[in-house]
Amino acid sequence: MKKISGTVALVTGGASGIGKIVGFSLAERGAHVVLWDRNAEALKAAEAEAAARGLSVVGMACDVTDRAEVYRLAGEVSSRVGPVDILINNAGVVSGKTLLETPDDDIVRTMEVNVLANFWTVKAFLPGMLERDRGHIVTVSSAAGLIGITGLADYSASKFAAFGFHEAVRMEIGRLRKKVSTTVVCPFFIDTGMFAGVRTRFPLLLPILKPEYVARRIVGAILRGKKRLIMPRFVYATFLLRLLPVAFMDAVAGFFGMTRAMDGFTGRK
Protein backbone atom coordinates (compact mmCIF):
# COMPACT_ATOMS: atom_id res chain seq x y z
CA MET A 1 0.00 0.00 0.00
CA LYS A 2 1.27 3.46 -0.95
CA LYS A 3 2.00 5.88 1.88
CA ILE A 4 -0.37 8.88 1.61
CA SER A 5 0.20 10.68 4.91
CA GLY A 6 2.47 13.69 4.49
CA THR A 7 2.34 13.71 0.69
CA VAL A 8 1.14 16.64 -1.40
CA ALA A 9 -1.71 15.85 -3.78
CA LEU A 10 -3.06 18.20 -6.44
CA VAL A 11 -6.49 17.66 -8.01
CA THR A 12 -7.67 19.59 -11.06
CA GLY A 13 -11.39 20.27 -11.28
CA GLY A 14 -11.29 19.85 -7.52
CA ALA A 15 -13.96 22.27 -6.30
CA SER A 16 -16.85 19.85 -6.76
CA GLY A 17 -17.87 16.38 -7.87
CA ILE A 18 -15.34 13.56 -8.12
CA GLY A 19 -12.37 15.90 -7.73
CA LYS A 20 -13.55 17.28 -4.42
CA ILE A 21 -14.47 13.87 -3.02
CA VAL A 22 -11.11 12.39 -4.01
CA GLY A 23 -9.26 15.39 -2.60
CA PHE A 24 -11.06 15.21 0.72
CA SER A 25 -10.52 11.44 0.90
CA LEU A 26 -6.78 11.88 0.41
CA ALA A 27 -6.75 14.65 3.04
CA GLU A 28 -8.50 12.31 5.47
CA ARG A 29 -5.55 9.97 4.99
CA GLY A 30 -3.09 12.70 5.94
CA ALA A 31 -2.24 14.21 2.56
CA HIS A 32 -1.86 17.95 2.04
CA VAL A 33 -4.32 18.56 -0.79
CA VAL A 34 -4.40 21.38 -3.32
CA LEU A 35 -7.57 21.85 -5.33
CA TRP A 36 -7.38 23.63 -8.69
CA ASP A 37 -10.56 24.88 -10.28
CA ARG A 38 -11.86 27.87 -12.25
CA ASN A 39 -14.72 28.37 -9.80
CA ALA A 40 -13.26 30.56 -7.06
CA GLU A 41 -16.48 30.62 -5.01
CA ALA A 42 -16.75 26.83 -5.02
CA LEU A 43 -13.09 26.62 -3.96
CA LYS A 44 -13.76 28.90 -0.99
CA ALA A 45 -16.69 26.74 0.04
CA ALA A 46 -14.56 23.60 -0.26
CA GLU A 47 -11.80 25.16 1.83
CA ALA A 48 -14.29 26.15 4.53
CA GLU A 49 -15.79 22.66 4.59
CA ALA A 50 -12.33 21.10 4.81
CA ALA A 51 -11.30 23.43 7.63
CA ALA A 52 -14.43 22.53 9.59
CA ARG A 53 -13.44 18.87 9.24
CA GLY A 54 -9.82 19.51 10.18
CA LEU A 55 -8.46 18.63 6.77
CA SER A 56 -5.40 20.12 5.07
CA VAL A 57 -6.95 21.46 1.86
CA VAL A 58 -5.93 24.57 -0.10
CA GLY A 59 -7.95 25.91 -3.02
CA MET A 60 -6.33 27.80 -5.88
CA ALA A 61 -8.27 29.34 -8.75
CA CYS A 62 -6.65 28.07 -11.94
CA ASP A 63 -7.64 27.82 -15.57
CA VAL A 64 -5.83 24.62 -16.53
CA THR A 65 -6.15 25.46 -20.22
CA ASP A 66 -3.80 28.43 -19.71
CA ARG A 67 -0.34 26.86 -19.69
CA ALA A 68 1.35 30.04 -18.44
CA GLU A 69 -1.02 30.11 -15.48
CA VAL A 70 -0.47 26.40 -14.83
CA TYR A 71 3.31 26.82 -14.79
CA ARG A 72 3.11 29.92 -12.58
CA LEU A 73 0.79 28.33 -10.05
CA ALA A 74 2.83 25.14 -10.04
CA GLY A 75 5.68 27.20 -8.59
CA GLU A 76 3.31 28.73 -6.05
CA VAL A 77 2.13 25.28 -4.96
CA SER A 78 5.72 24.19 -4.38
CA SER A 79 6.52 27.25 -2.30
CA ARG A 80 3.26 27.32 -0.29
CA VAL A 81 2.54 23.63 0.23
CA GLY A 82 5.48 21.62 -1.09
CA PRO A 83 6.45 19.57 -4.15
CA VAL A 84 3.53 17.65 -5.62
CA ASP A 85 3.69 13.88 -5.09
CA ILE A 86 0.28 12.95 -6.52
CA LEU A 87 -1.21 14.68 -9.55
CA ILE A 88 -4.83 13.90 -10.41
CA ASN A 89 -5.93 15.25 -13.78
CA ASN A 90 -9.66 15.24 -13.22
CA ALA A 91 -10.91 18.49 -14.81
CA GLY A 92 -13.38 17.85 -17.61
CA VAL A 93 -16.23 19.35 -19.61
CA VAL A 94 -18.90 17.88 -21.87
CA SER A 95 -21.09 19.51 -24.53
CA GLY A 96 -23.40 16.52 -25.04
CA LYS A 97 -24.37 17.23 -28.65
CA THR A 98 -23.81 15.46 -31.94
CA LEU A 99 -20.88 16.74 -33.98
CA LEU A 100 -22.98 18.87 -36.33
CA GLU A 101 -24.87 20.41 -33.41
CA THR A 102 -21.76 21.29 -31.42
CA PRO A 103 -20.50 24.89 -31.79
CA ASP A 104 -16.85 25.15 -32.81
CA ASP A 105 -15.95 27.02 -29.63
CA ASP A 106 -17.36 24.16 -27.52
CA ILE A 107 -15.24 21.64 -29.42
CA VAL A 108 -12.10 23.70 -28.83
CA ARG A 109 -12.97 24.10 -25.15
CA THR A 110 -13.49 20.35 -24.74
CA MET A 111 -10.07 19.62 -26.22
CA GLU A 112 -8.37 22.31 -24.15
CA VAL A 113 -9.81 21.14 -20.83
CA ASN A 114 -9.94 17.38 -21.36
CA VAL A 115 -6.67 16.91 -23.27
CA LEU A 116 -4.27 19.84 -23.50
CA ALA A 117 -4.54 20.69 -19.80
CA ASN A 118 -3.04 17.26 -19.04
CA PHE A 119 0.04 18.18 -21.05
CA TRP A 120 0.58 21.39 -19.09
CA THR A 121 0.08 19.89 -15.63
CA VAL A 122 2.25 16.86 -16.31
CA LYS A 123 5.00 19.04 -17.79
CA ALA A 124 4.77 21.25 -14.70
CA PHE A 125 5.00 18.50 -12.07
CA LEU A 126 6.60 15.40 -13.64
CA PRO A 127 10.16 16.81 -13.70
CA GLY A 128 10.10 17.22 -9.92
CA MET A 129 8.74 13.71 -9.47
CA LEU A 130 11.50 12.27 -11.65
CA GLU A 131 14.13 14.24 -9.76
CA ARG A 132 12.84 12.97 -6.39
CA ASP A 133 12.28 9.48 -7.87
CA ARG A 134 8.74 9.25 -6.51
CA GLY A 135 5.26 10.35 -7.47
CA HIS A 136 1.95 9.28 -8.95
CA ILE A 137 0.02 10.62 -11.94
CA VAL A 138 -3.69 9.87 -12.33
CA THR A 139 -5.52 10.57 -15.58
CA VAL A 140 -9.32 10.52 -15.50
CA SER A 141 -10.33 9.33 -18.96
CA SER A 142 -13.69 7.64 -19.56
CA ALA A 143 -15.43 4.57 -20.92
CA ALA A 144 -16.14 6.98 -23.79
CA GLY A 145 -12.38 7.02 -24.28
CA LEU A 146 -12.53 3.32 -25.13
CA ILE A 147 -15.54 3.33 -27.43
CA GLY A 148 -17.21 6.16 -29.33
CA ILE A 149 -20.68 7.16 -28.14
CA THR A 150 -23.33 8.95 -30.18
CA GLY A 151 -23.70 12.54 -29.00
CA LEU A 152 -20.21 12.63 -27.54
CA ALA A 153 -17.98 13.07 -30.60
CA ASP A 154 -15.83 15.81 -29.07
CA TYR A 155 -15.89 14.27 -25.59
CA SER A 156 -15.03 10.78 -26.83
CA ALA A 157 -12.23 12.16 -28.98
CA SER A 158 -10.82 14.07 -26.00
CA LYS A 159 -10.98 11.04 -23.72
CA PHE A 160 -9.42 8.75 -26.33
CA ALA A 161 -6.64 11.34 -26.53
CA ALA A 162 -6.28 11.50 -22.74
CA PHE A 163 -6.01 7.70 -22.64
CA GLY A 164 -3.34 7.70 -25.35
CA PHE A 165 -1.45 10.55 -23.73
CA HIS A 166 -1.41 8.72 -20.41
CA GLU A 167 -0.23 5.48 -22.00
CA ALA A 168 2.64 7.17 -23.83
CA VAL A 169 3.76 9.05 -20.71
CA ARG A 170 3.59 5.83 -18.71
CA MET A 171 5.93 4.17 -21.20
CA GLU A 172 8.30 7.13 -21.19
CA ILE A 173 8.50 7.00 -17.39
CA GLY A 174 9.02 3.24 -17.53
CA ARG A 175 11.97 3.61 -19.88
CA LEU A 176 13.57 6.01 -17.39
CA ARG A 177 13.20 3.36 -14.65
CA LYS A 178 11.89 5.93 -12.18
CA LYS A 179 9.57 5.20 -9.26
CA VAL A 180 6.73 7.32 -10.57
CA SER A 181 3.44 5.42 -10.74
CA THR A 182 0.55 6.06 -13.10
CA THR A 183 -3.16 5.24 -13.07
CA VAL A 184 -5.67 5.78 -15.87
CA VAL A 185 -9.35 5.81 -14.87
CA CYS A 186 -12.13 4.92 -17.32
CA PRO A 187 -15.56 5.09 -15.68
CA PHE A 188 -19.00 4.78 -17.25
CA PHE A 189 -21.39 7.72 -16.73
CA ILE A 190 -21.20 9.21 -13.23
CA ASP A 191 -24.14 10.76 -11.40
CA THR A 192 -22.53 14.13 -10.64
CA GLY A 193 -24.85 16.35 -12.69
CA MET A 194 -22.32 16.63 -15.49
CA PHE A 195 -24.16 13.83 -17.32
CA ALA A 196 -27.65 14.57 -16.05
CA GLY A 197 -30.30 12.98 -18.24
CA VAL A 198 -28.19 10.15 -19.66
CA ARG A 199 -29.67 6.69 -19.50
CA THR A 200 -28.47 3.11 -19.54
CA ARG A 201 -30.35 0.24 -21.14
CA PHE A 202 -28.90 -2.39 -18.81
CA PRO A 203 -28.35 -0.84 -15.37
CA LEU A 204 -27.16 -4.10 -13.84
CA LEU A 205 -24.33 -4.38 -16.36
CA LEU A 206 -23.75 -0.67 -16.99
CA PRO A 207 -25.01 1.25 -13.97
CA ILE A 208 -24.86 5.03 -13.69
CA LEU A 209 -22.07 5.24 -11.13
CA LYS A 210 -22.30 7.07 -7.82
CA PRO A 211 -19.55 9.67 -7.34
CA GLU A 212 -18.66 8.40 -3.86
CA TYR A 213 -18.09 4.91 -5.26
CA VAL A 214 -15.91 6.20 -8.10
CA ALA A 215 -13.87 8.38 -5.75
CA ARG A 216 -13.34 5.47 -3.37
CA ARG A 217 -12.14 3.27 -6.22
CA ILE A 218 -9.75 5.99 -7.46
CA VAL A 219 -8.21 6.42 -4.02
CA GLY A 220 -7.94 2.64 -3.69
CA ALA A 221 -6.17 2.46 -7.05
CA ILE A 222 -3.68 5.11 -5.88
CA LEU A 223 -3.03 3.26 -2.63
CA ARG A 224 -2.48 -0.05 -4.43
CA GLY A 225 -0.56 1.29 -7.38
CA LYS A 226 -3.18 0.01 -9.83
CA LYS A 227 -2.28 1.12 -13.34
CA ARG A 228 -5.72 0.86 -14.97
CA LEU A 229 -9.12 1.32 -13.34
CA ILE A 230 -12.18 0.60 -15.49
CA MET A 231 -15.70 0.81 -14.02
CA PRO A 232 -17.87 -1.19 -14.15
CA ARG A 233 -16.09 -4.39 -15.14
CA PHE A 234 -18.42 -4.89 -18.09
CA VAL A 235 -16.68 -1.98 -19.84
CA TYR A 236 -13.69 -4.30 -20.32
CA ALA A 237 -15.81 -5.91 -23.05
CA THR A 238 -14.98 -2.95 -25.29
CA PHE A 239 -11.51 -4.43 -25.79
CA LEU A 240 -13.12 -7.61 -27.12
CA LEU A 241 -15.45 -5.62 -29.38
CA ARG A 242 -12.39 -4.23 -31.16
CA LEU A 243 -11.66 -7.74 -32.42
CA LEU A 244 -15.01 -7.95 -34.21
CA PRO A 245 -15.89 -6.67 -37.70
CA VAL A 246 -16.91 -3.02 -37.49
CA ALA A 247 -20.54 -3.61 -38.52
CA PHE A 248 -20.96 -6.28 -35.86
CA MET A 249 -19.24 -4.11 -33.24
CA ASP A 250 -21.60 -1.23 -34.04
CA ALA A 251 -24.61 -3.53 -33.78
CA VAL A 252 -23.52 -4.81 -30.37
CA ALA A 253 -22.82 -1.29 -29.14
CA GLY A 254 -26.27 -0.23 -30.33
CA PHE A 255 -27.88 -3.18 -28.56
CA PHE A 256 -26.29 -2.08 -25.29
CA GLY A 257 -27.59 1.45 -25.76
CA MET A 258 -24.47 3.33 -26.79
CA THR A 259 -26.29 5.03 -29.67
CA ARG A 260 -29.20 6.24 -27.49
CA ALA A 261 -27.61 6.87 -24.09
CA MET A 262 -27.37 10.64 -24.66
CA ASP A 263 -30.88 11.14 -26.04
CA GLY A 264 -32.19 12.57 -22.75
CA PHE A 265 -29.01 14.47 -21.84
CA THR A 266 -29.51 17.82 -20.13
CA GLY A 267 -26.17 18.23 -18.34
CA ARG A 268 -25.36 20.42 -15.40
CA LYS A 269 -27.44 23.62 -15.34
Image (spheres, rainbow, N blue to C red):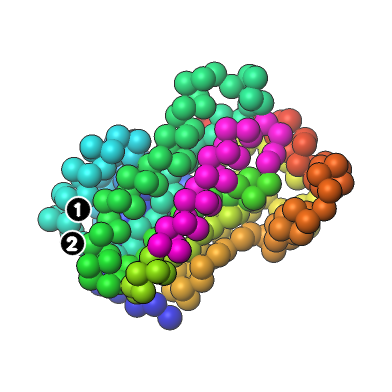
What secondary structure is found at the residue carrying circle 2?
Answer: loop
Residue 32, image x, y percentages = 26, 63
Q: Check contact, mark 2 vs mark 1: CB within 8 A.
A: yes
Q: Is residue 129 visible?
A: yes
Residue 17, image x, y percentages = 47, 47
What secondary structure is found at the residue carrying circle 1?
Answer: helix
The residue beneath circle 2 is: 82
Q: Which residues are magenta?
A: 148-172
The residue beneath circle 1 is: 77
Front residue of 116/231: it is 116
Residue 223, image x, y percentages = 44, 73
Describe residue 47's horizontal placement relative to residue 118 as left or right: left
Q: Is residue 53 visible?
A: no
Residue sitting at x 63%, y 33%: 153
Q: Earlier in the sequence, mark 2 or mark 1?
A: 1
Q: Quadrant of residue 72?
A: top left
